[in-house]
Image (tube, grey):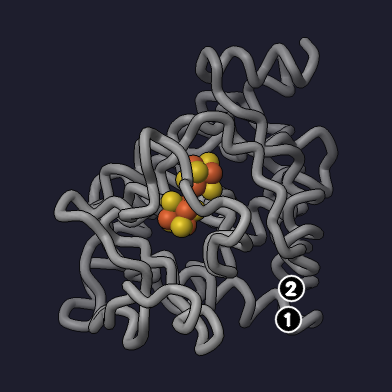
Amino acid sequence: MTTTTKIAAYQAGARDPGTASNFIRSMTRRADPARVPCGGCTGCCRSAYLFADLDAEECGRFPDAVHSDVVGGMVLPKREDGSCTYLIEGKCSIYERRPRACRVYDCRDRLLLGAFDGNDPVMLQALQEWAPFRTPTGEDMDLLSAARAAVQVDGLPETYKEALAKFWAVYRRPKQWRKLMKVAAKFRRRFAAMPVDEVRMLYAELVASATARCKTLGETRRAPAPGSMVRCLKSPVGPRRVAERRS
Ligand code: SF4
Ligand code: SF4
């Protein structure tokens, strides 16, 4: 079975986010603008939870900018439904002069980290339209596992922002990152040698223990919302991917 056939099997019409290793490399030298194959998606422009924040120069260019208590600064205005007022008939009406926040935004970070804000239905829908990251090599699989493990160091994060900060905190410490990569490789080899049913059981236990751990943190951390962090433990880097590789 080729990689392309595997992706097509996930969801008809799903966009290919590329390989995990290419994406992580692109994160570390993120270009302006980010090259995201969005197709017809406008999720981040419609999300009530995402804001196009503006720097001082951009505030001068957008006299209709408003202050956001959430961001703690000036942002582009939104409609009542949470969408950006510059989104007109499904398109950005100021595409060539959109602010930097819009130019560099790449929702695939969330896909990579398995960090989805469960209270944002618009972004959840947008993220579901991507196929999983491709992992054609062992390194790709280990990078994806290590990235998802990094965001869970010292407990599950509450938000995507926290997850991203945790990822960078580990990724920028080569010693820690190498350690996680080693653990990921060890797990991959172990899973590859195990019958698929046993892998599934192991993942079920991992999900249960991650959820229980989250609950025991009580006041400081809440249990993950359905479809949020728990989902990353069920993702294709786990048993499903192993099952495909074995077939
Ligand atoms: S949510 Fe992602 S795919 Fe959709 S428009 Fe935004 S960056 Fe593009
Ligand atoms: S300015 Fe354009 S790209 Fe930015 S949020 Fe608004 S519609 Fe989307």
The local secondary structure at tag 2 comes to helix
Answer yes or no: disc 1 within 8 Å of ligand 1: no
Q: In this view, does 73 lie to the left or right of 241?
A: left
Mark 1 touching mark 2, by CB under 8 A? yes
In the rendered image, residue 197, in percent from the top left (x then y), is placed at 51, 24
Residue that appears at 78% across and 58% down? 26
Residue 32 lies left or right of residue 86; in this view the side is right
Q: Dot 2, crowdedness within 10 Å: few (<14), some or many (≥20)? A: many
In this orientation, which residue lies closer to the viewer: 6 or 52? 52
The residue identified by callout 2 is: 177
Q: Name the residue under label 1.
A: 172
- Decide if residue 239 is in sight here: no
How crowded pointer 1 is (Cα within 10 Å; few <14, some 14-19, many 20+) is rated as few
Q: Position of residue 114 (x, y in %)?
A: 49, 51
74 or 105: which is nearer to us? 74
Residue 88 drawn at (x, y percent): 37, 41
Q: Earlier in the sequence, mark 1 or mark 2?
A: 1
Q: Residue at x 61, y 39 (%)?
A: 237
Where is residue 41? Give x, y as percent. 47, 35
Which kind of residue does numbered mark 2 sit on? Trp
Residue at image location 38% in from the left, 46% down from the top: 87
Query: Does 206 sit above or below residue 29?
Result: above
Regarding residue 220, the answer to whether it shows in the image is yes
Query: Quadrant location of residue 13?
Result: top right
Q: Nearer the viewer, residue 200 or 1?
A: 1
Q: In the figure, residue 30 lies in which quadrant?
A: bottom right
- Indicate the quadrant containing the N terminus: top left, top right, bottom left or bottom right: top right
Q: Closer to the observer: label 1 or label 2? A: 1
Relative to 96, residue 197 above or below: above
Residue type of the residue flagged with mark 1: Arg
Along the line of sight, the residue nearer the viewer: 125 or 24: 125
